Image: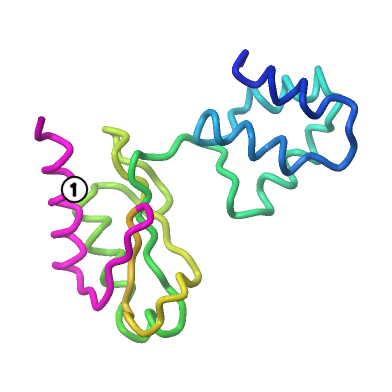
């Protein structure tokens, strides 16, 4: 937890900086570890219940480690009517994890989201910052297979 020392020093004694503090911690670890909450409470006097409340209210914060590739499947109205559920089902099968979980190898985290803002391409998923549209279950699984293949090549 010594990685968060600069964050503590930067925001020590300053009010109203809970979100930037949590963002800083998450940028270091990829999520906000339980130990970080305890340390921020002890060293900065931030209340555990307030930190947890903020971290669970905002979708940007994560309380558990995520995979190298975050897969977001859109379930907004346009994608929903174009069978987004079938895409999620195919990815659950391909990855061997439930929605909201990370593969054992730490490569992929699967998430259903409300809207990705790409309605004209429905149904859509994003892997990292790359958008894949006009999908079906087979196409979505193919994207993951290709990514996995690229991870194993030197």
- Location of residue 6 in the rendering, given as x and y in whole percent from the top left corner: 69, 20
- Location of residue 56 in the rendering, given as x and y in whole percent from the top left corner: 66, 48
Quadrant for the N terminus in the image:
top right
| Badge 1 element | helix
Say whether residue 53 is magenta. no
- Location of residue 17 in the rendering, given as x and y in whole percent from the top left corner: 81, 40
Q: 52 or 26, which lies in front?
A: 26
Q: Disc 1 marks which residue?
A: 147
Mark 1: few/some/many CA within 10 Å (<14, 14-19, 20+): some
Question: Quadrant location of residue 78?
Answer: bottom left
Q: Residue at x 42, y 39 (%)?
A: 66
Residue stretch in magenta? 128-154
- Note whether 71 is above or below 76 in the view shown: above
- Location of residue 24 in the rendering, given as x and y in whole percent from the top left corner: 64, 34
> As drawn, is 77 to the left or to the right of 93?
right
Q: 9 or 109, which lies in front?
A: 9
Q: Residue at x 28, y 74 (%)?
A: 133
Quadrant for the C terminus in the image:
top left
Q: Residue at x 58, y 35 (%)?
A: 26
């Amino acid at each position: 937890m010594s990685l968060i020392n600069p964050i503590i020093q930067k925001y020590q004694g300053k009010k109203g900086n809970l979100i930037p503090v949590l963002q800083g911690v998450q940028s270091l670890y990829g999520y906000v570890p339980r130990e970080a909450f305890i340390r921020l409470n002890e060293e900065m006097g931030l209340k555990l219940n307030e930190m947890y409340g903020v971290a669970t209210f905002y979708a940007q914060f994560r309380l558990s480690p995520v995979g190298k590739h975050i897969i977001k499947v859109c379930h907004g109205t346009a994608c929903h009517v174009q069978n987004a559920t079938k895409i999620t089902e195919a990815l659950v099968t391909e990855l061997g994890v439930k929605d909201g979980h990370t593969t054992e190898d730490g490569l992929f985290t699967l998430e259903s989201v409300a809207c990705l803002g790409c309605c004209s391409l429905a149904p859509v998923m994003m892997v990292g910052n790359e958008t894949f549209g006009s999908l079906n279950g087979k196409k979505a699984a193919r994207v993951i297979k290709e990514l996995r293949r690229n991870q194993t090549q030197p």
